[in-house]
């Protein structure tokens, strides 16, 4: 069955709702208490405390030396072979259709269910897109996409399996794209950031999620030097704004903060899991930045939390699933506990 017309229509639609819209939440739950507690994203609730912006960050165009320093810091932080393998962009979202356009249109397969924008971006680039639920079904595609750890369920594909897939695709000129947006809180040994010499592997890394600065719009593509040069040419000069450069340079070099934050997020993730378990709700997966819940009454739980002023992420095609971000402090944890306690008397 030719699915290209249908996917082309989907590509013309506006970007999928990914959570985080308190305007929509307020319209849906007009009587909810405020302020809202937004747990609908997988963004660190403890943002990196970068120093005050100098006037030059907004008054002058970014310097090439600052871009070079940023990509060098990113290469060290993510484990890429060199800065020449790293391209900085105003968020990985903008990179998705550019990455898909590195290949002539052909069969593209995305391991799902996962982040919907990969399919939309590949369709925009002219590929015939198919979402598959079996890892082995990715073989034979010209473009294969794996989100690792996966959003929203935290599924993890091992590095050895990904390298084997890349090897099998290389003979036919295929490219493997691995979206490691949440790998900062994942097992670093499973990252493919140091495996770019194979030539047909491209890794995406998000800055804003782990560092809690999504609004700065900063992300990276890690790939062969040839593909990096092509992406750089498409992006043109000054792709990264001065404020993002300023914060990115500081945050990527602050190893002490990074280590302490990973420990803090793990502790808070365990605390959130225990809270849901106490109320008879078992967490099915996720990462240290978000939890994934599968329950037959997930829609009821979404509505109850919404009426309590707590926004979580639901999925139109999977009504039994919810994604829940980490509360940022004791008060936020208490709001979640109280809301769960008031739901059906605290039962499942």
Image (cartoon, grey):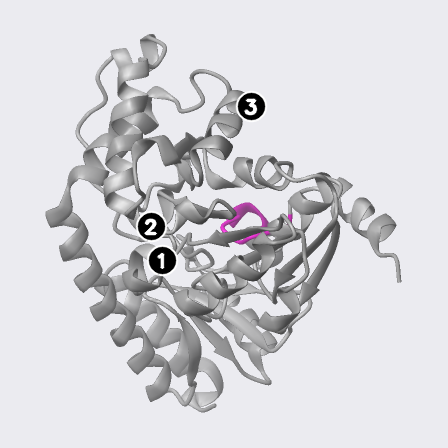
Region of the chain picked out in magenta, as a range: 16-24
SS at circle 1: loop
> Is residue 122 toward the left or the right of residue 99 in the image?
right
Q: Which of 225 and 210 is in front in this view?
A: 225
Read off the residue under disc 2. Answer: 194
Q: Nearer the viewer, residue 310 or 209?
A: 209
Q: Which of 139 and 180 is in front in this view?
A: 139
> Is residue 57 toward the left or the right of residue 103 in the image?
left
How far across and down, in percent of the image, does residue 147 sit? 50, 59
Read off the residue under disc 1. Answer: 191
Q: Tell me which label, 3 or 1, sits earlier in the chain.
A: 1
For the point 52% across and 23% down, the residue is 235
Residue 23 within the segment the image draws in magenta: yes
Instruction: Tell me which corner region of the image, top left, top right, bottom left or bottom right, holds residue 160.
Output: bottom left
How far across and down, in percent of the image, does residue 76 sit? 23, 41
How far across and down, in percent of the image, does residue 169 sit? 59, 57
Crowding at mark 2 (Cα within 10 Å: few <14, some 14-19, many 20+): some
Residue mark closest to the camera, 2 vs 1: 2
Q: Is the C-beta separation of discs 2 and 1 under 8 Å?
A: yes
For the point 63% across and 64% down, the residue is 138
SS at circle 2: loop
Q: Nearer the viewer, residue 301 or 157?
A: 157
Residue mark closest to the camera, 3 vs 2: 2
For the point 19% across and 62% down, the residue is 264
Residue 302 within the segment the image draws in magenta: no
Q: Residue 234 carries which label?
A: 3
* Vertical comparison of 78 with 186: above or below: above
Crowding at mark 1 (Cα within 10 Å: few <14, some 14-19, many 20+): many
For the point 41% across and 57% down, the residue is 42
């Amino acid at each position: 069955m030719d699915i290209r017309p249908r996917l082309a229509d989907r590509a013309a639609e506006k970007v999928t709702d990914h959570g985080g819209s308190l305007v929509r939440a307020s319209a849906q739950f007009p009587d909810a208490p405020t302020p809202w507690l937004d747990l609908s994203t997988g963004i660190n609730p403890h943002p990196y405390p970068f120093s005050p912006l100098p006037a030059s960050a907004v008054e002058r165009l970014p310097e090439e030396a600052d871009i070079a320093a940023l990509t060098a810091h990113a290469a060290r932080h993510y484990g890429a072979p060199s800065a020449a393998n790293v391209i900085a962009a105003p968020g990985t979202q903008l990179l998705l259709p550019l990455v898909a356009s590195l290949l002539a249109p052909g069969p593209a397969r995305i391991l799902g269910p996962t982040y919907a924008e990969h399919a939309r971006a590949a369709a925009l680039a002219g590929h015939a897109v198919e979402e598959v639920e079996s890892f082995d079904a990715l073989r034979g595609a010209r473009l294969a996409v794996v989100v690792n750890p996966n959003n929203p369920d935290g599924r993890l594909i091992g590095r050895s399996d990904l390298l084997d897939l890349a090897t099998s695709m290389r003979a036919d000129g295929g490219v493997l794209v691995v979206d490691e947006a949440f790998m900062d809180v994942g097992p670093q040994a499973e990252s493919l950031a140091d495996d770019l010499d194979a030539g047909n592997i491209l890794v995406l890394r998000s800055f804003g999620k782990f560092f809690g600065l999504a609004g700065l719009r900063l992300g990276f593509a890690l790939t062969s030097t040839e593909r990096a040069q092509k992406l750089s040419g498409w992006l043109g000069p000054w792709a990264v704004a001065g404020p993002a450069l300023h914060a990115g340079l500081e945050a990527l070099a602050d190893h002490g903060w990074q280590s302490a934050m990973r420990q803090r997020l793990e502790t808070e993730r365990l605390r959130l899991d225990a809270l849901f378990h106490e109320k008879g709700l078992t967490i099915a997966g996720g990462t240290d930045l978000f939890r994934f819940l599968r329950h037959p009454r997930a829609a009821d739980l979404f509505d109850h939390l919404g009426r309590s002023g707590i926004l979580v992420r639901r999925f139109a095609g999977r009504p039994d699933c919810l994604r829940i971000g980490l509360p940022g402090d004791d008060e936020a944890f208490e709001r979640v506990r109280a809301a769960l306690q008031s739901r059906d008397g605290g039962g499942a």
